[in-house]
Image (tube, rainbow, N blue to C red):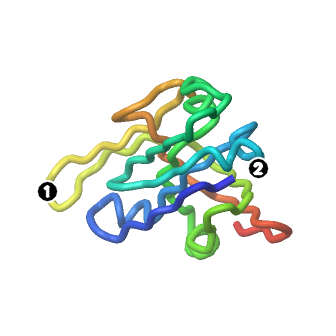
Amino acid sequence: MVVSRKTYSFGWDGEISPLDLAVVWGKLAEPEYHRFMSYRQSGRWYFYKYKSGFPLDDHYIISHSSNNHIIPANKNVKRAVMTIGEGDKVVLEGFLVNLKGDYKGRAVTWNSSTTRVDTGNGSCEVFYVYKVRIKDMVYE
């Protein structure tokens, strides 16, 4: 389930990845747990807070949530991912990727996390998406 979304349009990363999606699964996506949580994104980072009495620990939250830098495979996929909103339950298919290149004369790199238990810088997923399922619609 998508809990936060943030669009980007500037810089090399904004050209490649116009959208970040913070997603949760497992108990975090269930209404009785979701009501304890708040999420936000800023500067390609994802943040969460939980209310007092929340029955799950940070380890569970970290292992059942992620911030995904979405790289659409084509224009149709881009149009579809740009319609995704908070609360949507979606299925995204693709690959985690590492990027290395040159942008306006300077070297750029962007590496994907490949573990579910990391936090901080480098813990986001760089996700090349080639298929999107929103409700009964599929976009490729």
Q: Residues within 10 Å of mark 2 (few under 14, many from 20)?
A: few
- Amino acid tagged 1: Gly
Q: Earlier in the sequence, mark 2 or mark 1?
A: 2
Q: Is residue 102 left or right of residue 26?
A: left
Residue 30 coordinates in the image, percent (x, y): 77, 45
Q: Residues within 10 Å of mark 1 (few under 14, many from 20)?
A: few
Q: Is residue 106 left or right of residue 61?
A: left
Name the residue that disc number 1 marks: 105
- Amino acid tagged 2: Pro
Residue 55 coordinates in the image, percent (x, y): 67, 29
Residue closest to the far left = 105
Residue at horizontal 56 percent and vertical 41 percent from the top:
51
At numbered mark 1, what does the secondary structure look like: helix, strand or loop? loop
At numbered mark 2, what does the secondary structure look like: helix, strand or loop? helix
The quadrant holding residue 60 is: top right
Of the pair 59 and 114, the residue shown nearer to us? 59
Q: Which one is closest to the eye, mark 2 or mark 1?
A: 2
Name the residue that disc number 2 marks: 31
Residue at horizontal 69 percent and vertical 52 percent from the top:
1
